[in-house]
Image (cartoon, rainbow, N blue to C red):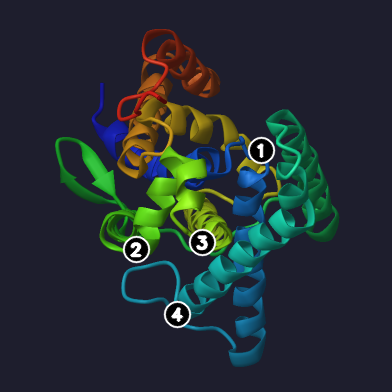
Amino acid sequence: MSLQFVVDGLLTGSMIGLGAIGVTLTYSILRFSNFAHGDFMAWGTYATLAVVSAIGAMVGKVAPIGPLSFGWPLIVALIVGMAFTALLALLLDKVLFARLRSQDQAIIVVMASFGASMGLRSLLEFTFTSRPTYFSRAIQIAMPVGFGIRITPDQIALLLLTAVLVLGVHLLMTRTQTGRAMQALSQNAALARIVGIDVAGVVRVTWIIGGALACVAGVMIGILVQIRPFMGFDMLLPMFAAAILGGIGSIPGAVLGGLIIGLAEAGAVQLIGAEWRAAVSFIILMAVLFVRPIGLFGVRER
């Protein structure tokens, strides 16, 4: 068995983990499962692609950065895409989710998120068609790093980006007043309101973080694989599995869960075939729910 699956698994796990951070924050703070989260990923990716195309139309072809397959327009576009996706999440919350949360019926909000998911995906497909597209069609030569493992410059850059973003979110959650307020609201919403925590502000930050990271995960998929309207929907089950495996509310848990899911999927492709890849997330999810429902780093509610 080739060890190449380790790199493939880490890359897939990075995408899943970044998306799972938004899933776990939404569930722990807002108390509902957001099925539209995968579509935030797709919308952010297409927004980034649109900005890249606009920059290309204005300044012409731009040379790639060093050995990478993309240039500075993609970096600028990613920042714009993250902001757009965060605004999309905030808008959807203001128009739909916030109104339904006030009714204190979680199942209604969950079903609304499912409907929003289908609406966003259909609108995306209508606008951009279902034909796959790419950020770049440049072919990169994978570099051997030993033990039969090969990796491209793009893959190295994206793994480093994931590490930086995860560290940033971790520091935000543990070293800032906003992060401590988010943890307090997650653990005891009623007490958090009594002590004067700005609940509306915490909710806004939750959507901003989740939306921005979903965009980054989607762009990673677009760089390494392809861009299509169903890309976020296909990642939905792995993201939920990672969030539950890591423990709802745990940022490190969501990332670790994503890496475990990614490595398991990549290993399954080598051992039993690609057709079983999608089943791996479901199997792990069911195993966690039976053995340790609170996940690896979850805390039982009191």
Residue 34 lies in quadrant: top right
In the image, which is nearer the foreground, mark 2 or mark 1? 2
Q: Secondary structure at mark 4?
A: helix
Task: For label 3, count other residues whose C-alpha is less than 10 Å away and answer few (under 14), some (14-19) or many (20+).
Answer: some
Identify the amino acid type marked 3: Asp
Task: For label 1, count other residues whose C-alpha is less than 10 Å away and answer few (under 14), some (14-19) or many (20+).
Answer: many
In the image, which is nearer the foreground, mark 1 or mark 3? 3
| Viewer can see residue 264 | yes
Instruction: Read off the residue under disc 3.
Output: 198
Identify the amino acid type marked 2: Gln
Instruction: Read off the residue under disc 4.
Output: 72
Residue 66 lies in quadrant: bottom left
Instruction: Read off the residue under disc 1.
Output: 35
Q: Secondary structure at mark 2?
A: helix
Please say if the residues under marks 1 and 3 sit with CB atoms less than 8 Å apart: no
Identify the amino acid type marked 1: Phe
Please say if the residues under marks 4 and 2 sit with CB atoms less than 8 Å apart: no
Q: Nearer the viewer, residue 67 or 249?
A: 249
Q: Earlier in the sequence, mark 1 or mark 3?
A: 1
